[in-house]
Image: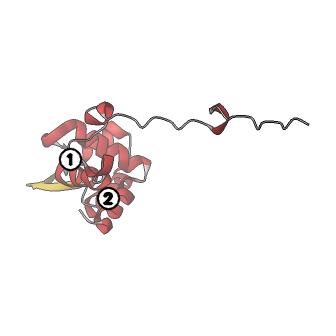
């Protein structure tokens, strides 16, 4: 995924109703849902839902599958995985095996540097005399 596509996907998610639609479709997996099911689940007016579905489809986050007179909407897991990969591409210096909860936790953390005040500094000697 390139930067332009990532921005388009993020913009698609940057609205409460659209984020709720995507989360609903992710929960449903490959089965997806018809618009009527989504409207019922999310308590959304059909015209409003239609607008949001169009925006999500344009962003590539959902796919519309035509089944006769009905349209089934399914989350586009390929695009979402591409977005996650784009966002985490250089995680931990580009280590491919590094994601939170796995290898990141086992990476030794750098030790904090001592503060100058904590160092033992020899006091200047006074001259006798």
Quarter occupied by the C terminus: top right
Q: Which of labels 1 and 2 is toward the front?
A: 1
Classify 120 as above or below 53: above
Q: Quadrant of residue 56?
A: bottom left
Q: Quadrant of residue 126?
A: top right
Q: Residues within 10 Å of mark 2 (few under 14, many from 20)?
A: many
Residue 80 point in image, percent of width and height: 24, 51
Q: Which residue is mark 1?
A: 96
Q: Residue at x 50, y 36 (%)?
A: 112
Residue 8 point in image, percent of width and height: 33, 63
Q: Is residue 4 left or right of residue 117?
A: left
Identify the residue at the far front of this view: 129
Q: Is residue 52 left or right of residue 29?
A: right
Residue nearest the viewer, comparing 16 with 113: 113
Residue 111, numbered label: none
Q: Residue at x 26, y 41 (%)?
A: 98
Gap in Å between the C-alphas at discs 1 and 2?
23 Å
Residue nearest the viewer, comparing 98 with 40: 98
Quarter occupied by the N terminus: bottom left
Residue 116 visible? The answer is yes
Q: Which residue is mark 2?
A: 9
Q: Residues within 10 Å of mark 1 (few under 14, many from 20)?
A: few
């Amino acid at each position: 995924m390139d930067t332009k596509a990532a921005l388009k996907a993020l913009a698609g998610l940057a609205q409460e109703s659209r984020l709720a639609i995507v989360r609903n479709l992710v929960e449903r997996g490959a089965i997806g849902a018809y618009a009527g099911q989504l409207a019922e689940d999310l308590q959304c007016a059909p015209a409003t839902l239609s607008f949001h579905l169009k925006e999500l489809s344009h962003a590539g986050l959902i796919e519309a599958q035509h089944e006769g007179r009905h349209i089934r909407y399914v989350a586009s897991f390929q695009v979402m995985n591409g977005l996650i990969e784009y966002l985490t591409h250089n995680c931990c210096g580009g280590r491919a095996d590094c994601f939170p909860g796995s290898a990141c936790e086992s990476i030794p953390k750098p030790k904090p540097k001592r503060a100058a005040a904590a160092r033992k500094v020899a006091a200047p000697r006074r001259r006798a005399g």
